[in-house]
């Protein structure tokens, strides 16, 4: 297999017919380059890779220009430097010659007309030759106009001396000018417009075959390489190439050096890649205690999220899959998908957000470690700039995106997108890349990896639907069986993504990770009520050092008042408890003489005819 970079092969093919080349894209990467005098490959920067190709075609040297240092011969071999200095009358100072755009025009002319030796001119950092490519000053305009004219009048040449080139004497090649730019748009558009002599070479990210060969070359840096068998080395190269999809070869080299310094062996190459992507070597997912914590977590979760056994069981399955590293195991490659994806659907106030907090507490030891986004704040399409950062040139571009910044700072986290159906449909498209590839690129071009995060969506979809007249009607009732609620909610979610949004691909990325929560039953409502009352008693004790006593009759009265309507779930119970008890209790405590008291009993709760509730204390 020919592993010569595609742009190098295109350059060699076009040298007889093109005088200039605009090289853009992944120009700062490393490239697989043949080692002179050996039948092996190495990783080398663009300039060295370019020289390996051109020298094989008989080119004697390169002249390299950049706006800071000026002009210099390449490579720094005495014979090359001496020949370039003589042919172009270079006045080198510490290996370089200062040059402006005006003097560079003369150098371009001399290179294209040089017949004694094949050579090429490389203009590095060409994206920074001007401040604005579409607003040139007089000097800049004359420079690019001269370059355009040279591209048309230059001719391919054959060196005069048979000893000057190892290439076949009958083969005429241009002495080319190569512009190295980040983007082709960084040069004036009219320079290459309708030009038959200026070719565009776009350097793309390395493909699997290239990464695989680079992995074989870099394997020697990993501890344990010498003792590894041939099959183990082959498996390592395949794994390394799979895990680094979308990364440059320079990134692969950095990962290998990181593994060498951290003592990460070949068998743990995934840890080295993860360390490079998220910037952390300590992986909570691989801690031995995590499996023990999750194994006994069912009762812990049920104590915090009451009455949702079906949803908890489904969530636990997905969490165990995440801990065992089997997310997306059905796919051919390892991929970089998030550790887990959960879509919590169901009525309001039934524990969806609480379960997300509980997961965070369980895995990361702190329920406040989760990253939350209220998607009602992203109802407008332009709000996507808040998540990913503004595009270049817009206000706030330097700040980056709220989502990408947060995940980059806390790569091991639960990322909660609350009420996802309220976000603008265009913003939902951003989640396709997160769910499939586990990464997202912000407005500054920086990539954020979600491969170590759990993504949680919450939604009220399916509880209410629109009838044939466009009216909002309740789709499920508290009296419906759990199986009926789950079926109807799932169907409503499918209809929403497939027909209302016309984005079935989002639903497809979610797969079977939809977890449907049921309504709060009266028995569960009573338990939630008891827990909230306990919290109130604890708060009174903490704030005032007083034990608050509630007789059974008062508890029964509060329970009846606060759980008569369970349609709003636990949040509704809390709201009614606040109105029926906490507010009048606060008023009563404010007026009651507390000094010297260690206990206070709520004797009764009365409601006057005008609706004012009173808590009586003794």
Image (cartoon, rainbow, N blue to C red):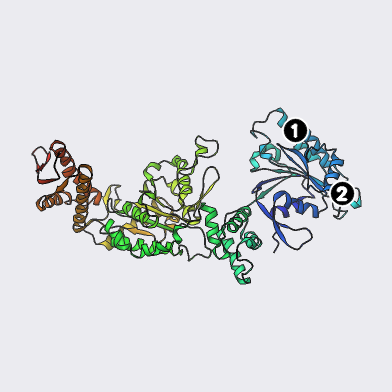
Q: Where residue 83 sits: x, y (%)?
A: 86, 45
Mark 1–mark 2 CB contact (< 8 Å) = no
Answer left or right for 277 relative to 564.
Answer: right
Q: Where residue 396 sits: x, y (%)?
A: 49, 36
Image quadrant assignment for residue 226 = bottom right
- Say which residue appears at 35% left-offset and 61% top-offset: 315
Give the crowd class for mark 1: few <14, some 14-19, many >=20 residues within 10 Å.
Answer: few
**Helix, strand or loop for disc 2:** loop
Q: Is residue 174 visible?
A: no
- Say which residue appears at 66% left-offset and 37% top-offset: 128
Answer left or right for 242 relative to 103.
Answer: left
Q: Where residue 77 sits: x, y (%)?
A: 81, 49
Farthest residue toward the top? 138
Of the two numbered discs 1 and 2 on the same chain, state the one appearing first in sequence: 1
**Rendered position, 397 above or below 208:** above
Q: Quadrant of the C terminus?
A: top left
**Helix, strand or loop for disc 1:** loop
Give the crowd class for mark 2: few <14, some 14-19, many >=20 residues within 10 Å.
Answer: many
Q: Quadrant of the N terminus?
A: bottom right
Question: Circle 1 is placed at which residue position?
Answer: 100
Given residues 345 and 214, the one toward you in this image is 214
Given residues 374 and 537, the one toward you in this image is 537
Answer left or right for 12 relative to 236.
Answer: right
Q: Is residue 177 visible?
A: yes
**Rendered position, 146 above or below 359:** above
Farthest residue toward the front? 596
Answer left or right for 214 relative to 378.
Answer: right
Mark 1 to mark 2 CA distance (whole Å):
30 Å
Q: Where residue 419 sits: x, y (%)?
A: 35, 48
Q: Which mark is residue 158?
A: 2
């Amino acid at each position: 297999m020919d592993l010569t970079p595609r742009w190098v092969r295109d350059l060699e093919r076009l040298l007889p017919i093109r005088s200039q080349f605009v090289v853009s894209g992944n120009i700062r990467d490393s490239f697989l380059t043949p080692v002179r005098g050996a039948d092996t490959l190495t990783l080398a920067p663009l300039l060295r890779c370019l020289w390996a190709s051109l020298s094989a075609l008989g080119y004697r040297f390169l002249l390299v220009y950049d706006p800071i240092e000026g002009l210099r011969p390449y490579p720094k071999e005495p014979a090359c430097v001496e020949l370039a200095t003589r042919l172009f009358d270079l006045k080198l100072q510490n290996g370089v010659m200062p040059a402006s755009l005006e003097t560079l025009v003369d150098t371009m002319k001399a290179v294209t007309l040089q017949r004694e030796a094949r050579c090429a001119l490389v203009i590095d950092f060409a994206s920074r030759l001007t401040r604005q490519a579409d607003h040139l000053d007089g000097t800049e305009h004359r420079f690019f106009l001269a370059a355009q004219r040279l591209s048309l009048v230059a001719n391919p040449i054959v060196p005069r001396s048979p000893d000057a080139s190892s290439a076949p004497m009958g083969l005429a090649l241009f002495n080319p000018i190569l512009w190295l730019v980040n983007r082709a748009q960084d040069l004036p558009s009219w320079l290459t417009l309708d030009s038959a002599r200026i070719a565009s070479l776009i350097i793309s990210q390395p493909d699997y075959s290239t990464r695989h060969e680079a992995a074989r070359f870099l394997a020697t840096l990993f501890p344990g390489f010498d003792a590894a068998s041939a099959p183990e080395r082959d498996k390592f190269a395949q794994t390394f190439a799979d895990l680094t999809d979308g990364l440059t070869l320079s990134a692969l080299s950095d990962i290998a050096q990181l593994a060498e310094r951290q003592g990460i062996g070949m068998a743990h190459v995934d840890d080295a890649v993860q360390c490079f992507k998220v910037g952390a070597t300590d992986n909570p997912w691989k801690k031995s205690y995590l499996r023990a914590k999750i194994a006994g977590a069912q009762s812990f979760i049920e104590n915090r999220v009451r009455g949702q056994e079906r949803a908890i069981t489904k969530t636990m399955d997905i969490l165990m899959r995440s801990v065992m590293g089997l997310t997306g195991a059905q796919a051919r490659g390892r991929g970089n998908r998030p550790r887990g994806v959960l879509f919590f659907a169901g009525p309001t106030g039934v524990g969806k957000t609480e379960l997300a907090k509980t997961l965070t507490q369980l895995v990361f030891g702190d329920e406040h470690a989760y990253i939350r986004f209220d998607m009602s704040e992203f109802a407008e399409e332009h709000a996507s700039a808040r998540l990913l950062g503004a595009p270049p040139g817009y206000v706030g571009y330097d700040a980056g995106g709220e989502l990408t910044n947060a995940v980059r700072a806390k790569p091991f986290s639960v990322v909660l997108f609350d009420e996802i159906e309220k976000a603008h449909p265009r913003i939902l498209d951003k989640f396709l890349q997160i769910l499939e590839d586990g990464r997202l690129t912000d407005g500054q071009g920086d990539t954020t990896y979600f491969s170590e995060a759990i993504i949680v969506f919450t939604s009220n979809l399916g509880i209410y639907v629109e009838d044939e007249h466009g009216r909002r009607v309740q789709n499920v009732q508290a009296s419906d069986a759990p199986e009926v609620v789950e079926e109807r909610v799932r169907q409503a979610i499918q209809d929403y993504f497939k027909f209302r949004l016309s984005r079935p691909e989002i639903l497809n990325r979610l797969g079977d990770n939809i977890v449907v929560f049921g309504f709060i039953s009266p028995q569960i409502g009573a338990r939630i009520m008891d827990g909230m009352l306990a919290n109130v008693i604890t708060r009174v004790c903490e704030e005032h050092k007083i034990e608050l006593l509630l007789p059974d009759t008062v508890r029964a009265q509060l329970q009846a008042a606060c759980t008569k309507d369970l349609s709003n779930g636990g949040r509704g119970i809390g709201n009614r408890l606040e109105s029926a008890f906490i507010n009048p209790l606060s008023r009563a405590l404010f007026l009651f003489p507390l000094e010297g008291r260690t206990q206070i009993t709520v004797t009764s709760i009365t409601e006057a005819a005008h609706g004012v509730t009173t808590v009586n204390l003794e």
